[in-house]
Image: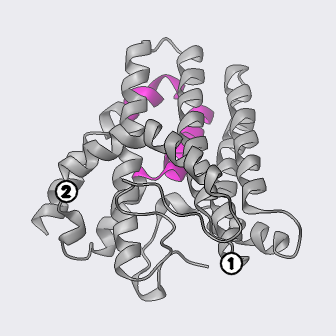
Amino acid sequence: MSKLPKAHKFVDLSDYGRPAARVISLALKDTKFTPIDVTIGFIISGLFAVFCIIYGYYWFAAFFLIFKSILDAADGELARIKKTPSYTGRYLDSVADIILNAIILLALWYITDTNIYYTFLAFLGIQLQGTLYNYYYVILRNQFNGDTTSRIFEDSTPTALAGEKQKNVDILFGLYKLLYGLFDKVIYTLDKNAPKGKVLPKWLMTSISTFGLGFQLLIIAIMLVTGLKDFIIPFFIGYSLMIFVFIAIRKLL
C-alpha cells in the first residue's frame, strides 16, 4: 500500500526495498507479528551491519544495511495492511534510525583515519538531508490525503490512536523531539513556507529522495564493497551542500 495516491506517486530512489517489504508484510499479515516487531528486526539488522563493518566483513555489512532498509519499509507497510497505524511505531522507527545512524558513522570512523569532527559533521549532514526529504514528503502526503501518521510540524504530543498507550506515545515523542528537534528547526527555518507553496514536481521529489535513509545506506553499502570506505564520510559532508540547492529550486518553483 502506498503512502500517496497513485496519481501523485514519484520514483523514490530511497524506497528500493518496497517490493521486498510488501512480500514480507503480506507474509506477516495473518500472523501475530506486529509492525513493532519488524522495527525491532531492522534494529537488529543495523547492529549486525555495525559488527560487520568493524570486523571488515563488508559484503555482509552491505547485506545487513540493505536488509535494514527493507525492514524499515516493511514495518510501515505491515501497519497499513493490518490497518493498525500508531504513533508509537512512527516515533520508535525514527528514534531507532537516528541512533543507528550515529553508531554506523562511529563504526566508519573506527575503521578509517577520518577525524572525529568530520564524522560529527557527516552525521549532522545525513540528518539534515533526511529531515529535508521527510519534510517535503510529509507535505506532499498531507496535500493529497496520503498516509498522515507523520505530521508536517511535530510541535505537540499527539493523542494515542486505537490500540496504543498514551504513555508510550508521550515517551517516544519526547525522545523524538530531543533527537530531531534541532534538525527540524533548521529545515523549517530554511524553508518555512514550503507547506504553502505549489505541489513539488515529481522530478524534484525523485532528486530529493537521494536524501532518504534507504539511499544513504545503499551508498554506504556500495562504497564499502568497492573499497571506498575512506570516502564515505567526506561524501556525506560534501553532498549536504545539495540541501541549499534543492531548497533554492523549491523556492524558485
Q: Nearer the viewer, residue 20 or 95?
A: 95
Q: Residue at x 40, y 55 (%)?
A: 156
Determine whether 211 is above or below 142 in the image: above
Q: Residue at x 31, y 70 (%)?
A: 203
First to last magenta residue range: 211-236
Q: Nearer the viewer, residue 159 or 253?
A: 159
Q: Residue at x 50, y 51 (%)?
A: 215
Image quarter (top left, top right, bottom left or bottom right) of the C terminus: bottom left
| Residue wearing tag 2 | 192
Q: Nearer the viewer, residue 16 or 162?
A: 162
Q: Is residue 199 left or right of residue 133?
A: left
Q: What kind of secondary structure does the magenta stretch mostly adopt?
A: helix
Callout 2: SS: loop
Q: Nearer the viewer, residue 150 or 67?
A: 150
Q: Is residue 62 left or right of residue 230?
A: right
Identify which amino acid the numbered label 1 is placed on: Lys
| Residue wearing tag 1 | 83
* CA gap, disc 1 and disc 2: 32 Å
Question: Is residue 238 visible to the viewer in this orientation of the structure?
Answer: yes
Q: Is residue 126 left or right of residue 105?
A: left
Q: Position of residue 108 (x, y in %)?
A: 56, 23
Residue at the extreme bottom of the image, as rendered = 7
Q: Position of residue 105 (x, y in %)?
A: 53, 27
Determine whether 130 is above or below 120 in the image: below
Identify which amino acid the numbered label 2 is placed on: Lys
Q: Position of residue 71 (x, y in %)?
A: 70, 56
The tag earlier along the polypeptide, 1 or 2, is 1
